[in-house]
Image (cartoon, rainbow, N blue to C red):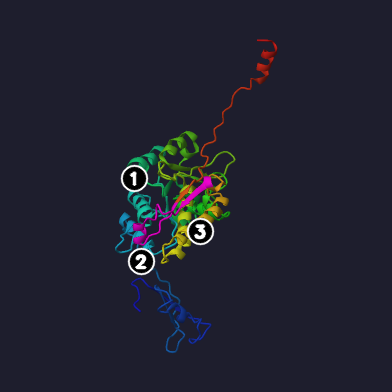
Amino acid sequence: MSVPQHALYLVTTSRPWTGSTTGYIEAIVNDERTGSNLIRVIDQLLAGHPVPDVQTVQLAGGNDGLTGLDDSDFVGSEAGKTGLNAFDHVQDLTMLLVPGRATSAVHNAMVAYCEVDRDGTVFAILDPPANQSTTGIVDYVQNTAALIELTEFAAIYWPRVLVLNPAKSVFGPADKIPVLPSGILAGVYARTDSARPGGVYDPPAGIDKGRMFGVLGFETDEILEEAKRDLVYPKRINPLTTGPGLPRYIDGSRTLKGSSNFPYVAERRGVIFIKRSLKQGLQFARHKNNTEGLRAQVRRTITAFLLTQMNNGAFRSREPFKAFFVDVSETLNTPSVIFAGKLIARVGLATNKPAEFIVLRISQDTRALEAELAAAGA
């Protein structure tokens, strides 16, 4: 096997196993199939190899392959299965994020991949560009990237978050460093999904379910001002914030498209889950004769699944006829449809909407005064 140009050679002067042992260091590291591509081991204690003196070698000239990367490397191409299209063979992909590349080109490519390439079965978490003020992130979403009202299959968050510096020799002397939040947000999504059966229907937001662990602060203090957050909400931007006595949490659950059928993160991801589950659960119907009996069986299968999801909190009502409907009738499955080898089922879902704002209306209690006036005949 050829050795890479910048391979590292390791010379060992002590071996606890013989060359015939499966745990022998040369057998493991130098194996052509499962061994290292960068390290080769030479046992100097073999006959004819004198033990060398202790040496110190400065490694230089290496290349980690990151030099010159641009947006096209992340966007990739369908023909070459590069960039985002490298995920094409991952059948159970549900979320997409590209940490470290918060650009207009990459964001728009992520949206297109989720909605078009993956037929709306993947949801994208978009990072904010670095050093964005309130007006800066609004301008980016509205003008630079033109993301507003673009899709219900993605959500963008702001600002970047501060975390503990893991290596000051690498990232500088600061105790805290700003990082893109998508990795942390994906963790919040996963935690919410797995918290209970039907967790995917719960918005990954708020001081409880939207709490972000490991976050020490935010890149800009503007996010702490309610007036500033009120500027980004209408632009479908989800702020990350905190308050007196509160943890650092996700303070929004909007997708980029408010005019869509499912404009909220949990709502859209819940429908994705239902769609994927039904598609997998109806595989039994493929290649069977499209008869009235088969369509009735399909209807029963869909209804049974949706009843379970209703009990898991997927819909606005716990009454089936208000929560969903299933139509596998002859109106949809006309002779021409059946002749084309298709079976069509139409499913309607009354999904939940989160309470985004708590409105308190406080007025003076005048009941005692009104009673006194009434008693006086006024």
Foreground pick, 174 / 354: 354
x and y percentages locating residue 251 in the rendered image: 50, 42
* Three-letter amino acid code of the residue under disc 3: Thr
x and y percentages locating residue 256 in the rendered image: 41, 44
**In which quadrant of the rendered image does the N terminus lie?**
bottom left
**Which is nearer the N-term, disc 2 or disc 3?**
2
Foreground pick, 54 / 214: 214
* Three-letter amino acid code of the residue under disc 1: Ala
Within-10-Å neighbours for mark 2: few <14, some 14–19, many 20+: few
Disc sitting over residue 94 in the figure: none
User: Per the image, is 172 magenta?
Assistant: no
Query: What whole-number distance in Å separates the C-alpha atoms at marks 2 and 1?
Result: 36 Å
**Which is nearer the N-term, disc 2 or disc 1?**
2
* Residue drawn at 46 percent across, 81 percent down: 27
Residue, disc 2: 62
Q: Is mark 3 on a helix, strand or loop?
A: helix
* Three-letter amino acid code of the residue under disc 2: Gly
Within-10-Å neighbours for mark 3: few <14, some 14–19, many 20+: some
Q: What element carries label 1?
A: loop
Query: What whole-number distance in Å separates the C-alpha atoms at marks 1 and 3?
Result: 42 Å
Query: What whole-number distance in Å separates the C-alpha atoms at marks 2 and 3?
Result: 58 Å
Find out whether the residues at labels 2 and 3 contact each other: C-beta distance under 8 Å.
no
Q: Nearer the viewer, mark 2 or mark 1?
A: 1
Give the residues in magenta.
321-346
Foreground pick, 349 / 55: 349
Residue, disc 3: 301
User: Per the image, is 336 magenta?
Assistant: yes
Residue, disc 1: 145
Find out whether the residues at labels 2 and 1 contact each other: C-beta distance under 8 Å.
no
Check the image and name the residue furthest to the right: 375
Q: In the figure, 157 relative to 296: above or below? A: above
